[in-house]
Image (cartoon, coloured by chain):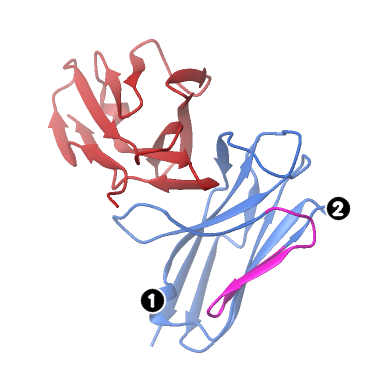
Amino acid sequence: DAGVIQSPRHEVTEMGQEVTLRCKPISGHNSLFWYRQTMMRGLELLIYFNNNVPIDDSGMPEDRFSAKMPNASFSTLKIQPSEPRDSAVYFCASSGGPLGNTIYFGEGSWLTVV
Amino acid sequence: QQPVQSPQAVILREGEDAVINCSSSKALYSVHWYRQKHGEAPIFLMILLKGGEQKGHDKISASFNEKKQQSSLYLTASQLSYSGTYFCGTPNANAGGTSYGKLTFGQGTILTVHP
């Protein structure tokens, strides 16, 4: 089975540009998470969807960040406008199915804002 | 609230043992352990659902003391492949032993195994 698929794997963009990160969760999983990882702050949960509905977005840092999950197989995380401090690895993860408690991470999207 | 891991870093020689601790100031319903190698995604190791539960895989095992609100990960006879950052994750305070809820991760423990 394919795991969580994220794109792009790497992105370098200029400050002020819009960034869109994409995620395809594991088929059959009903929970999807967006995490951000930096050296300073570690792994932070940004937003969490259950059955395509945002349940908790308290970790979204600012209004510049938005996330959507239009269907069970696709989610996006958008940053507009991007700033250098947004540089991080963004992980999408999903859980559900027979092993509901296990969270499976994608390979991550490495974002650099210059 | 973020669980606290200790130590922050461990350096071992192959064959040595290590213990990584994870503690929380709030009640724990389950504890998840992950390992992340540099430049890669965190990989699930194991989940402990009940207080007192112990699990093991190969030479990596873990215990969960619900009353003390802590969990420990034991690495026995460490191998070079064990090197990486280990994270514990705890779900929101939630009724029951299982939760589909979000995980809050500790700050990580960097484990380095030398030949």
Query: What color is chain B drawn in?
Result: blue
Q: Chain of mark 1?
A: B
Q: Left or right? Give the position of B74 relative to A98.
A: right
- For the colour red, the matching chain is A
Q: Is residue B33 visible?
A: yes
Q: CA distance from mark 1 to mark 2?
A: 33 Å
Quarter of the image containing the C terminus of chain B? bottom left
- Compared with A13, A90 (above or below) is below
Q: Left or right? Give the position of B10 relative to A65.
A: right
The three-letter code of the residue at mark 2 reads Lys
Q: Which residues are magenta?
A: B49-63
Percent of width and height locating residue B48: 66, 57
How packed is label 2: few (under 14 Cα within 10 Å), some, or many (20 or more)? few
Residue to which mark 1 is pinned: B81
Secondary structure state at the residue bearing disc 1: helix
- Compared with B42, B77 (above or below) is below
Q: Chain of mark 2?
A: B
At 28% from the left edge and 48% from the top edge, which residue is drawn?
A: A107
The three-letter code of the residue at mark 1 reads Ser
Marked residue nearer the N-terminal end (1 or 2): 2
Q: Which mark is residue B17?
A: none
Residue to which mark 2 is pinned: B67
